[in-house]
Every structure is written in C-alpha cells, then in structure tokens.
Image (cartoon, rainbow, N blue to C red):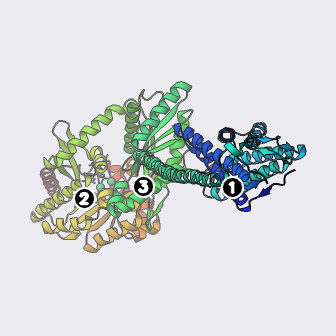
Amino acid sequence: MFDGSYNTSLVLFSLVVAILASYTALDMAGRITTAEGKSAHWWLAGGSGAMGLGIWSMHFIGMLAFSLPIPLGYDALITLLSLLIAIATSAFALWLVSQKELPWLRLGCGALLMGTGVAGMHYTGMAAMRMTPGIRYIPSIFCLSVLIAIVASGVALWIAFRLRRQSSQVWLLRAGAGVVMGCAIVGMHYTGMAAAQFPLGSACGAARDGVSIGWLALVIIIVTLAVLAIALIISVLDLRLESRTMALAISLAEANQELTHLALHDNLTKLPNRVLFEDRLDQAIRGADREKTRFGLMFMDLDGFKAINDAYGHHTGDLLLVEVAQRIVGNVRAQDTIARVGGDEFVLITNVGEPTDAATVADKLLRAIREPFQVAGHELRVSASIGIAMYPGNGVHQHELLTNADAAMYHAKALGRNTSCFFEVSMNANVHEQLQLAQDLRSALERRELILHYQPKFEAPNGPITGVEALVRWAHPTRGLIPPDEFIPLAEKTGLIVPLDEWVLNEACRQMREWRDAGHTSWTMAVNLSALQFSHARLVETVREALQRHALEPRCLTLEITESTAMRDADASLKILQQLHDMGVRISIDDFGTGYSSLLYLKRLPASELKIDRGFIRDLAHDTEDAAIVSAIVALGQTLNLKIVAEGVETEAQQQFLTRLGCNSLQGFLLGRPMPAAQFIETISQIDVLDGVA
Ligand code: C2E
Ligand code: MG
Ligand code: MG
C-alpha cells in the first residue's frame, strides 16, 4: 500500500473552511425562516450554493492536502458532480430546518439523507482521482465515516433548527455550533480518508488530463472564502435592514395604536369618549336583540360641579373629574361600559336583568359619589343625578335611548338632585321645553324681562315691617310670569345664574336706595344667592360694588343662602361668609332644617338669621313632630344668638303658634304676598292707613 501524507496547513485550512461554511449555513437557515415571500426562495438558493460550496471546498482542500508518492489529479466532471451533490444536500438541509416543525422522525430521516449526501459527495470526490486499480476501503472505517456523517448531520440539523430565530445572543451560540459542526464534517472527511487504501503500483488516471493541483488549491480557497464572506456580509446587511424595517414597522404600529386610543378615549379621565361609547351602545343594542337580554343606559351629571370649578379653578375641577371617574369605574362591573361624554357628564351601559337591578347600580353609584373627595388639599363634595333608560322599552335606536336617559336625568335634577330616575314618556316633552327655555333665558337678561317682586317680613306677630325679600320673576313674552323654581335650576345648569343674581343684587339695592330716600330707613333688603353665585370668586367684590353704587350701608343688606349651600363646602363657605360679615352685610341661613348642618359648624357660621323652611310651617297645627322641630330650631337659634324668621306663614293659627314659640320675624301670604315695588308701597300705605284708623 502507498503511504499517504498530509499537508498540515491545508488540513488546517480545510478545518477553517468547514467551520466558516457551518456558520454560514446556520446563518442562512435563520434568514430563510424570517424572510417572507419570494426573498425566502432567494435565501434558500443562495444559502444552498454558499453552504454546498463551503462543504465541498472543505472536502476538496482536504483532498488536496493529501498526497501519495505518485502524481495525483482530479477528473473535472466527477469533481463537479461531487460539488452538485454538496449543493443539493445543502438545499435539502436548509429547506428542512426552515419548516415550522421538526419532529424527531423527520429529523432522523433528514439526518439519514443529509449524511448520505455528505458521504456521497466525499466518495464521489475520491472517485474523481480515477485510480487504477480502484481505491480499497476498509469496511469498518468506511461505515464509521458514513455513521459520523449521519450523526453529524442530525446534530447539525437539530442545532440549525433551534438557532434559526434571530435574537441578540444567537450569533454567539451559532459560532459555537459552527465550530462543532465544522469539526464533525472534518472528522467525517478524514475518517473517510483513513478508510481508503491505495495498493502499491496504483496510478491516478486523472493525473494527466485532470486539473493541476498547485494553483487549484489556491483558487478554491480564495473563491470559497470569498463566496462565504459575501454571503455573510449580505446576510448581515440584510438583517440590519430587516431589523430597521421591523423597528420602523413596530413604532408605526405603536403610533397607530396610540392614535386610535386617543381618538376613542377621553384625555382627562382615560375613559371611552362619545365615539367609542356610541359604538359600544350599538353593540349592546345588537347583543340584546340577538340574545333577548336587556340593559340599562344611565346618564349621569354631577351636581354642583360648576360651582367647584368656579371656586377652585379648572385644575382642581379636572382632578375631581378624574377621581369621580375612578370611583365610578370602581363601582361598576368590568364588562359595563362607562364613558365621559361631556364636562361633568358620564354615561354607563350596564347589563341588568330587571329595572330594579339598574336602580341598585344607580344607588351604589350615588352613594359612592356622595362620599367626600380629597382633591388638591381640599375636601370636596359633589353628588350626581342619574337618568336611566332601559333597552328594550325606552327607545329603539341609540339616539333615542340617549335622549331619553338624558330626559330622565333632568327629571332627577328637578327632583332635588342626588337621586336617580327612570325614563317615562311624559318626560320627553319636558326636555324640548327646557331647551327652548334655556335659550330664551339667555336673551331674557338683555331684554330686561326679569323683574323683582318684594315680600315683606314682619316683626312677630304682625308688624311693623322689618324688611323685604327680593324674589325674582321672569316676565316671559309668551308664557307670562314664570316663578323662579322653574328657571333658577336652569340658570344654574347653564351658568347664567351668575349674571342673573348680579342683576338681582343691583336692582334690589337700587330699590332699597329709593325706599330709604322715601323714608323707610328701618327696612333691610334680603337677596337670595344661588350655590353657584356663592362660590363665585368675585362675589365679595360684586356685593361691595353694588352697595357703593347705590350708597347703601352694608347692614341694610341681608344675603340669604340655603343651608345646603352653606354646608356643601363648609370651609370655603366659611371664608366667604366671614368676608361678607366683616364688611357688615347680614347673612341669613335660608330653608333651615332641610340640610344636614352640624352644630359645630353652625356655631362658627357668622350668620345673623335662621329662616325655618316653610315645609315645617305648613302642617304646624296638625303635626306634632313639625312643632317639635320648629321649637327645637327656635331654641337652637336663641342659644346661638340668631334671629329666627318663619317663612310661609299662611294662617293665623300658625302666626300665633310661631309667635308663642319665640320666632322673631314672620313672612308669608297671610301678612303679605311677593309683589312689584309700586304695589308694595301702595299696600303698605293702606296697612298704615288701616293701622292709623285702628
Ligand atoms: P326662598 O328664598 O325660600 O323664597 C321664599 C319662597 O316662598 C318664595 O317663592 C315665596 O314666594 C314663597 N312664599 C312666601 N310666603 C309664602 C306662603 O305663605 N306660602 C307659600 N306656599 N309660599 C310662600 P318664590 O318667589 O317662588 O321663590 C322660590 C325660590 O326661588 C326662593 O326660595 C329662592 O330660593 C329662589 N329665588 C327667588 N328669587 C331668587 C333670586 O333672585 N336669586 C336666586 N338665586 N334664587 C331666587
Ligand atoms: Mg329666600
Ligand atoms: Mg326659603
């Protein structure tokens, strides 16, 4: 047998090429998996070429590193065939690992095919020497080389499949795997070579007409390295491009998502806005139709929010809205839709079986909102008015449902706020009327359609007159005289109450000046303030200006605020009341007994008068409970050094009873109705005349 020998540097080169080819193969496998459409085919074609060429050159450089004592050469055609086998095998391997799954059976078959392919390439390449007599192979080592090829292929396929996803650490793993795979391929080759035996006297048939070895080695090494390098560079560049495109696509998708979110949600509370809400309402209607279920639509409006906004500024108002939204969310089920559709308006779609369930939900919300809020260092209190429309029943499409829930909400407001109300057909007419009225009210101020009536207050039991209360009326061009209860709430809702009450204050002061000039110097003028006006920042200034304008002493003006207004935001009220009191203006607590005053707070109020609500006076003669309350209020007032006024005195029995209980002043239809200024003076002078006669 001839003794073969190896050129060490070429052997090392073959190892380098094997490792590089393996790394390229792994990288290509990754590219094929992540590429889309046509480019995946290109990567498969390019990858198979590069990998096939790589494996083949490793093998061929290994062959060139081998020398026998006789000249050696290689048949070009057979060598080309071995190259084709290498490329085909690579194509198969890359295709296999780019599949979605690689079950064990498929991996096994793949390893068998690929291993046979690699071994086939190797032994075809050996055949290119065209030895005569033919090379003899030692069977055991031959089998071992094929086994190594199969096992190495199996491991290579498995690794390539595992590492095909791109990630930050993958190239390191891939480099390690490349070394393992490279060594396996080299191992297979040199085991195969070790199996080959060349009998003494053999001749290489390709030595003469084959290609010369010297420069062939160089060309192959250079070409292979170039191909592998180019493949890797392209791969890296493409990966960069892809990841940049991917990053762009991701940020675009995120921006899109954000835009959609913004378009569908309220910026402040992060709740769905009207657009999203209408969509959900449509869905709810369709769902209820399909599944024959029902749901309740609730329209919620905060009571007294405007006042807070005016008193503490928009920032605090905003914070309060956020808190309210959170409280609402915390008190409804996750599948309910809650949206903010206006300044302080929220709507809720809640799946309920029966209207009573809707009422329970509404009650829960009312209770939650009523609890004080801690916002920006203030303790704020609001309540809500809720209108409920049921589907099916209170409307067939979303617009109708919403309008009806809104109408029910208005009704809840009219019922005194802090309550909920189910929609009824009769409410609808009301809504249109209210809208029209709100529009009219806007122009009423300019057109001077508002007038003041004056009602006298008498020292108990029947005089003399201690003062008058100015009560506003609206002389509507078509509806006639409208009482304040019908338009004051509307004015409060629309914010018109501020200019309205300013006008009342001025007009009352002007009238007072006139009367004082006419000699009625002992009278005081009482003017009502709405909750909104009361928390308006300019109130103190407005009062001061009105007094100065008509040259009135502050002590002849009494400002009436209702008990609930004074209690709503106790500390802030106290501050404003104190300023007014310091100015010399008298403060009267109106409708006393209907709110929930705390005694402690009452003690600190700089008020000079309590007006017992006329609700207690009405049934005084029959209702012992009312009598007990009135006498308790009188006792309380006396202790706190407050004058007690009883309003709504209609009968002589009431007049006597209240006088006996200790009320200081009486006001009511019995003694004098509210009337225009001119009529007032006329009536008074008649009384004086009568008194004079008597
Ligand atoms: P209020 O301040 O408690 O006014 C007393 C109300 O009781 C007046 O109703 C008066 O007409 C009525 N009244 C007086 N004596 C009797 C009686 O013997 N029997 C009965 N049943 N009622 C009597 P009015 O004028 O309809 O005013 C209602 C409410 O509207 C007032 O209650 C007050 O809160 C508000 N208001 C009136 N004028 C103004 C105003 O200029 N500004 C503001 N913000 N509110 C006003
Ligand atoms: Mg009053
Ligand atoms: Mg009153």
Q: Position of residue 429 (x, y in %)?
A: 32, 31
The first of marks 3 and 1 along the sequence is 1
Q: Circle 3 is placed at which residue position? A: 321
What kind of element bears circle 3? helix
Task: Give the amino acid at mark 3.
Answer: Leu
Q: Check disc 1 and give the amino acid type.
A: Ile
For marks 3 and 2 on the same chain, the one whose residue lies earlier in the sequence: 3
Identify the mark nearer the N-term, 2 or 1.
1
Q: Alpha carbon of mark 2 to alpha carbon of mark 1: how far?
A: 98 Å
**Left or right, residue 243 beside residue 160:** left
Q: Nearer the viewer, residue 623 or 164?
A: 164
| In the image, residue 238 above or below residue 537 | above
Q: Taking the image as drawn, is residue 141 in sight? A: yes
**Residue 107, percent from left and from top:** 76, 40
Question: What is the x, y in percent for residue 618?
Answer: 38, 47
Quadrant location of the C terminus? Answer: bottom left
Q: Nearer the viewer, residue 636 or 367?
A: 367
Spatial separation of the CA atoms under disc 3 and disc 2: 32 Å
Queried on whether the Cβ of the residue with tag 1 lies below 8 angstroms from ligand 1, the answer reads no
Q: Where residue 126 sits in the image (x, y, percent)?
A: 76, 44
Pair 3/2: label in front:
3
Question: Residue 501 lies in what quarter of the image?
Answer: bottom left
The circle drawn on residue 527 is 2
Q: Is residue 373 left or right of residue 199?
A: left
Which mark identifies residue 19? 1
Q: In this rendering, does residue 662 appear at all?
A: no
